[in-house]
Image: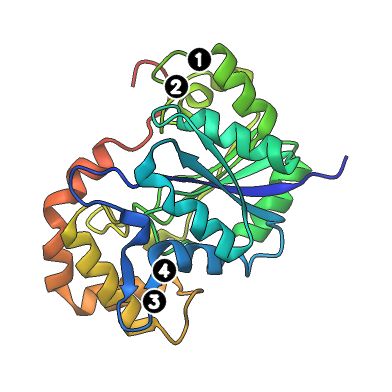
Amino acid sequence: MTRKLVAAIACRNQGSRLYAKPLQNLDVERGVRIIDNICNCLNTIDCIDEIVFGISEGIENEVFKFVAKEKGLRYVVGDQIDVLSRLVQCGQLAGASDIFRITSESPFLFFEPVEELWRKHQKEEADATFMDDIIDGCGFEFIALKALEESHAKGERKHRSELCTLYIREHIEHFKIIKADPFPELLRKDLRLTVDNPEDLVECRAVYSAFKDLAPRIPVCDIIRFLDENPKLIELVAPFTEAGYATMYRWGKHE
């Protein structure tokens, strides 16, 4: 069976620390938003057949319909809290066999291994492939749509949330899972490249400014070297790194 990979991006503007994170400008002069760099990067990856927005209900999120239309993308609108249901709807709308999962506030994807891991995901008939142990904001997941549908049907309230693969991670005995290993230099828990606070945005704007000629495919290893040469940027987001990694996925029910 031919598998179809669809990038499903859950979009909403609510945020207690920074409003409208996906729509914040990485490049104010050129008007390049976080969501623009994400979509532009995904469009360079051949194995991704389509991008679909999973937009949260609410008048404040209507803007994402216009963003989708300007990019020629399809979208669904669904429950604000139940992000998992929106991902499922994205996959069903596009006739996907698998979902490529990233977040809408993380502008710099570790794109280099995506094609190779997709081939491995298919060859091993995996239900889920996780690129986890990497700088916060740069990882990704391949998840079979049927596994997401099962997660939603059998999971509890906590699983029907932004923790979209938590049910799979807590029931690993029921799924075929691949845990991918990033390059060793990407194991940096003193760094983060996701925008959740104004300080994160300052850092990501500085990164984009330094590498805008390479955008949207800005190698994460190059970003690490840049940050190491600019320690004040690392210090700027340091207060958020420990909490960020503490809330990232863990494996098993008792961890």
Name the residue beneath numbered marker 2: 159
Secondary element at image label 3: helix
As drawn, the label of residue 220 is 4
Q: Quadrant of the C terminus?
A: top left
**Alpha-carbon span between mark 4 and mark 2:** 30 Å
Instruction: Name the colour scheme.
Output: rainbow
Q: Is residue 49 visible?
A: yes
**Residue in view at x 18 percent, y 77 percent:** 230
Amino acid type of disc 2? His
**Alpha-carbon span between mark 1 and mark 3:** 39 Å
**Residue in view at x 73 percent, y 52 percent:** 119
Amino acid type of disc 3? Asp
**Residue in view at x 46 percent, y 29 percent:** 79
As drawn, the label of residue 222 is 3
Name the residue beneath numbered marker 1: 155
Circles 2 and 3, Cβ within 8 Å, touching? The answer is no
**Alpha-carbon span between mark 4 and mark 3:** 5 Å
**Neighbourhood count class around disc 4 (C-alpha, 10 Å): few under 14, some 14–19, many 20 upward:** some
Select label 1 or label 3 by which is in front: 1
Select label 2 or label 3 by which is in front: 2
Q: Nearer the viewer, residue 238 or 89?
A: 89
Q: Quadrant of the N terminus?
A: top right
Circles 2 and 1, Cβ within 8 Å, touching? The answer is yes
